[in-house]
Image (cartoon, rainbow, N blue to C red):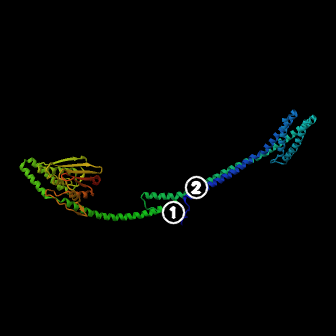
């Protein structure tokens, strides 16, 4: 059965919830405020009649006192006070009313009014007699007014007491009803509070419930479990929109992972074939490049050794033969394996020694080596061919002392090897031709040896092997300032590749 979709955005639902709860609380408070104020007003009105009787009694006392004062003093002030109190009492008697408890009280109130009218007439006559100096008359009138005053006072007090009893009974009833109203008001507030809590729980659950389901599915996907069920959409609000987008994203992820797996499998098969072809090609290329050995150098050096043996004693001949043996031994073993900078520099030292024997020490050779990089692995036969090139094309035919310098130092991202000679130098065309010798479109350009006194591995061979080994083009450079300005050859051995080789070697050792 399909679930009903909840309509409305979260904002609208929250606003409606706030308006509804606020409205209910407002009207409940207004209802309680009205009833409480009404009850308090009725309580305040309970003793209004008693207050009226008390005021009436006070006014009667004042009136009688002012009459007595005027009779004794006959002053204009006392007369004026009499008239004012007489008018005040007359008005209060006229306005005398209230909730009367029973018929007896009604009769007493009528008697008070009638006696008060008679009393007022009598005190008027008494005052008039005093003003006319009729002593006997005002005395008689005053005595009669005093008796009526006592009688009225007694009736007012009696009626006030009866009214107080009646009002006290009404006050207790109102207090009880007020207590009930407080209980009812508290109950209404508690009910409204519970209703609001339930309403808020229902609304928030309709919002947070889908969010919790969405969060659970998102955590599953974040943990790597992409085989999760789609989250049901039960609302058309923002959460529903996000849930639909999440479901769409989940389906897209499934499809994308499926395509990635298919692509990876296809790419893996293609790379496996390509790697086999590349390895075969590089192996053939390296063997071809390393096989270019000129036999003329071997014969010339052996002739030089034979001549030295004839002219000198056995010690130098022995040393010379040992260096020759080391030189050729290094060449033969290095064709099928890597070397280190230490071995490459040692080969250069051996080569320079042999040449100085051949040419009577005319080559000055200097070194500046960073000892910390001597154990770095490099392709074999990368330094001796460059030194050989410096001898053959740089310093052999100059009429001043030839000098060759080898420097090995470190840069932030590479090891720099520099070989400098002070010979005839090179022009730009020759430099460009040498640097362009290499592998193009899978074919190897052959370098033509310019002299027969060579081991056959020239600059082009070194450049090609370095490019193949490090898979970079900007690893080799040649610089010359012109004729008789010397030549500088620079090689940059990337440290990143060195690290990779060390890690691979360590991994092989660990696996072993």
Q: Is residue 45 above or below residue 472?
A: above
Please report whichever mark, 1 or 2, sits nearer to the chain's N-terminal start: 2
Residue 200 circle label: 2
Residue found 40% across the figure and 63% down from its top: 257
User: Residue 441 placed where, x, y %?
Assistant: 25, 64
Snapshot quadrant of residue 435: bottom left
| Residue in front for this viewpoint, 445 or 178 | 445
Q: Is residue 381 left or right of residue 321?
A: right
Specify whether 244 is left or right of 289. right
Work out which quarter of the rendered image holds the N terminus and state it: bottom right
Q: Position of residue 293 (x, y in %)?
A: 16, 58
Q: Residue furthest left?
A: 310
Callout 2: few (<14), some (14-19), or many (20+) C-alpha neighbours within 10 Å? some
Residue underneath mark 1: 233
Q: From this viewpoint, which residue is outermost toward the front?
A: 483
- Measured Cα–Cα span from mark 1 to mark 2: 21 Å
Looking at this view, is 249 or 425 the one in front? 425
**Residue closer to the observer: 122 or 424:** 424
* Percent position of residue 492, x then y: 26, 53
Give x and y (percent) for residue 102: 83, 48
């Amino acid at each position: 059965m399909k679930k009903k979709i909840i309509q409305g955005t979260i904002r609208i639902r929250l606003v409606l919830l706030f308006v509804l709860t606020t409205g209910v609380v407002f009207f409940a408070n207004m209802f309680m405020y009205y009833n409480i104020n009404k009850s308090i007003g009725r309580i305040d009105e309970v003793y209004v009649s008693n207050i009226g009787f008390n005021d009436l009694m006070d006014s009667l006392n004042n009136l009688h006192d002012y009459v007595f004062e005027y009779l004794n003093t006959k002053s204009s002030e006392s007369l004026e006070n009499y008239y004012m109190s007489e008018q005040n009492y007359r008005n209060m008697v006229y306005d005398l009313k209230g909730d009367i408890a029973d018929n007896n009280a009604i009769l007493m109130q009528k008697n008070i009014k009638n006696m008060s009218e008679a009393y007022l007439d009598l005190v008027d006559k008494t005052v008039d007699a005093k003003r006319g100096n009729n002593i006997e008359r005002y005395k008689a009138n005053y005595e009669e007014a005093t008796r009526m005053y006592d009688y009225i006072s007694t009736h007012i007090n009696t009626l006030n007491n009866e009214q107080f009893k009646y009002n006290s009974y009404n006050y207790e009833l109102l207090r009880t009803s007020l207590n009930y109203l407080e209980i009812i008001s508290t109950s209404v507030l508690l009910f409204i509070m519970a209703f609001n809590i339930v309403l808020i729980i229902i609304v928030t659950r309709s919002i947070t419930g889908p969010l919790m389901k969405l969060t659970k599915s998102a955590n599953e996907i974040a943990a790597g479990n992409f085989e999760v069920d789609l989250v049901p959409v039960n609302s058309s609000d923002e959460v529903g929109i996000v849930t639909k987008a999440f479901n769409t994203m989940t389906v897209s992820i499934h499809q994308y992972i499926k395509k990635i797996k298919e692509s990876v499998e296809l790419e893996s098969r293609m790379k496996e074939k390509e790697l086999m072809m590349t390895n075969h090609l590089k192996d053939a290329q390296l063997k071809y490049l390393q096989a270019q050995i000129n036999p003329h150098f071997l014969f010339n050096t052996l002739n030089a050794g034979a001549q030295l043996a004839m002219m000198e004693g056995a010690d130098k001949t022995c040393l010379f033969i040992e260096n020759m043996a080391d030189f050729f031994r290094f060449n033969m073993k290095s064709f099928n394996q890597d070397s280190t900078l230490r071995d490459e520099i040692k080969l250069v030292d051996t080569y320079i020694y042999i040449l100085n024997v051949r040419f009577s020490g005319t080559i000055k050779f200097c070194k500046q080596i960073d000892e910390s990089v001597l154990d770095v692995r490099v392709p074999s036969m990368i330094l001796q061919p460059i030194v050989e090139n410096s001898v053959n094309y740089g310093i052999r035919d100059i009429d001043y002392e030839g000098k060759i310098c080898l420097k090995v130092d470190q840069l932030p991202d590479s090891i720099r090897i520099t070989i400098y000679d002070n010979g005839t130098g090179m022009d730009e065309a020759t430099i460009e031709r040498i640097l362009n010798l290499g592998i193009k479109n899978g074919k190897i350009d052959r370098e033509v040896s310019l002299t027969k006194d060579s081991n056959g591995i020239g600059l082009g061979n070194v450049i090609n092997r370095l490019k193949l080994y490090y898979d970079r083009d900007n690893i080799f450079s040649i610089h010359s300032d012109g004729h008789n300005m010397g030549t500088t050859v620079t090689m940059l051995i990337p440290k990143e590749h060195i690290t990779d080789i060390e890690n691979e070697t360590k991994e092989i050792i660990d696996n072993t």
